[in-house]
Amino acid sequence: MQYTGVLKKMDTEITEKVQYYLDMKSDFINVNQLLNKQLTLDFVTYECLNCHLEKEIYRQGFCKSCFFEIPTAGDWIMKPELSKAHLDIEDRDLTYEKKVQLQPHIVYLANSSDVKVGVTRKTQVPTRWIDQGAHEAIEIVEVPNRYLAGITEVALKEHVADKTNWRTMLKNDIKDENLVEWRERLQAFIPEEAKEYYIANNSETNINFPVEKYPAKPKSLNIVKEQTYTGKLVGIKGQYLIFEDERVFNVRSNEGIVINLTIN
């Protein structure tokens, strides 16, 4: 059976084990059902997620011209502290920026390779944690806009990591942490503007991923360079497909790439 489509990050659903779904244009695949099956991935071409033209992908699934023009790729996406919609200041499209920035945001702690701090819209909890491969996470503050979340993250990352080590995450070489204690320790470093939004009474969320075998030495699969790859799927974690030969494929970092997916 073969499917063709442009890659976008997998949709997820938190259940006893996370359910993953891959949108392949005319087909919607439950990726969990592909576990222990032999899969072949073939690179076909590129398709920008914005203009849908056959142009080489630059970043985040967009061609170079779209990446530097569209509001969904503004600097404030990766650096929330640069958000200015609350000041009525436009970056690329004020209407869009108000829609996204002026809504409740969460600053959280997630444990994927180690404890890290991050920011997401409230509507993206727990999706954001799943995408990062976190096996446990907890909210620290809930603020009314992205700017306040951004400056809180900047302040807290002086005292806790803000990056995930993808190899450690995929090897599952991690330990459980008491995130309630972490949250309480970090409370003192929350900026004055955000202190009133501190969440004092909550518990951590635990996440289980559908992985049957973790790789000891994960090696990233570059499907554009290799053009084709065949392997047995043994796990899914974060946005990674994990294969039996310890190759791993990051679906999200390959957004905008058109592939043929064959289930052998």
Image (spheres, rainbow, N blue to C red):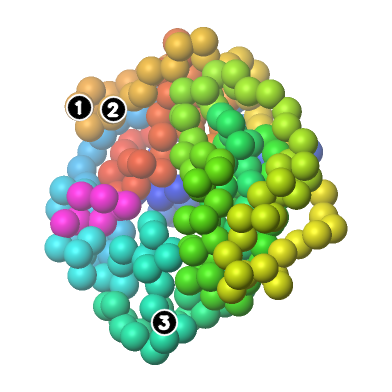
Give the camera-side residue of 236 and 45. Answer: 236
111 in magenta:
no
Say which residue label 1 marks: 225
Q: Position of residue 62 (x, y in %)?
A: 26, 56
Say which residue label 3 marks: 85
Residue type of the residue flagged with mark 2: Asn
**Boundaries of the magenta span:** 58-64
Give the camera-side residue of 23 and 254. Answer: 254
Q: Position of residue 207 (x, y in %)?
A: 71, 39
Residue reaching furthest bottom?
88
Q: Residue 22 vs residue 5: left or right?
A: right
The answer to whether the residue labelled 2 contacts the one labelled 3, judged by CB atoms less than 8 Å apart, is no
Between disc 2 and disc 3, the foreground one is: 3
Does residue 108 sit above or below 227 in this rendering? below
Neighbour class for label 1 at 10 Å: few (<14), some, many (≥20)? few
Q: Is residue 123 visible?
A: no
Which part of the image, by quadrant, shows the N terminus? top left
Report the disc number at residue 222: 2
